[in-house]
Amino acid sequence: MKFDHLPLWGWILVGLTLLIQATWIFLDARSRGKKPWLAWLWGFWGLTSFPLPSIVYLIAVIGLDRRRRKTGRSIRTKK
């Protein structure tokens, strides 16, 4: 199958996938973050490709947040 002859339903599916991913990342980043511009940055990156932004977001934001909650301190502080 050639990608330049993708049917209309394929383009709609690609668009919906990117829109859903970007919306989820934006809403989750906005609810977690203190910097509103960072949530917009994550959301815009979610519109560009699939699934790399979701994977990086899950590892970088959610994974580190869970680790911080488990240890009870910030990841960046060293004792």
Image (cartoon, helix red, strand yellow):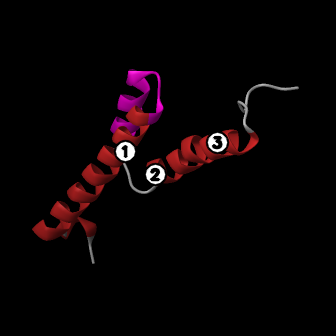
Dots 3, 1 in contact, CB < 8 A: no
Q: Main secondary structure of the magenta part?
A: helix
Element carrying mark 2: helix
Q: Quadrant of residue 10?
A: bottom left
Quadrant, the N terminus: bottom left
Quadrant of the rendering where the C terminus is positioned: top right
Q: Could you tell me if residue 48 is visible in this image?
A: no
| SS label for mark 3 | helix
Q: CA distance from mark 3 to mark 1?
A: 19 Å
Determine the residue positioned at 34% across, 52% down. Answer: 21
Taking 34 as reference, is 1 left or right? left
User: Magenta region: which residues?
Assistant: 32-45
Circles 1, 2 touching at the beta carbon (< 8 Å): yes
Q: Quadrant of residue 39?
A: top left
- Of label 2 and label 3, which has the lower sequence position? 2
Viewer-side label of 2, 3? 3
Query: Which mark identifies residue 54?
Result: 2
Q: Residue at x 61, y 48 (%)?
A: 63
Please name whichever residue, 42 or 2, is drawn nearer the observer in this view of the structure.
42
- Outermost residue on the left side: it is 8
**Could you tell me how far apart the alpha carbons at marks 1 and 2 are, in whole angstroms?**
7 Å
Of mark 1 and mark 2, the one earlier in the sequence is 1
Q: Magenta stretch: residue 36 in it? A: yes
**Nearest to N terminus: mark 3 or mark 1:** 1
Q: From the top left corner, tell me how far across and down residue 22 is, in percent.
A: 32, 45
Between tags 3 and 1, which lies in front?
Answer: 3
Q: Is residue 70 above or below residue 36?
A: below
Residue that badge 1 annotates:
46
Rendered residue at 40%/35% (across/down): 31
Which residue is identified by label 3? 64
The type of residue carrying mark 3 is: Leu
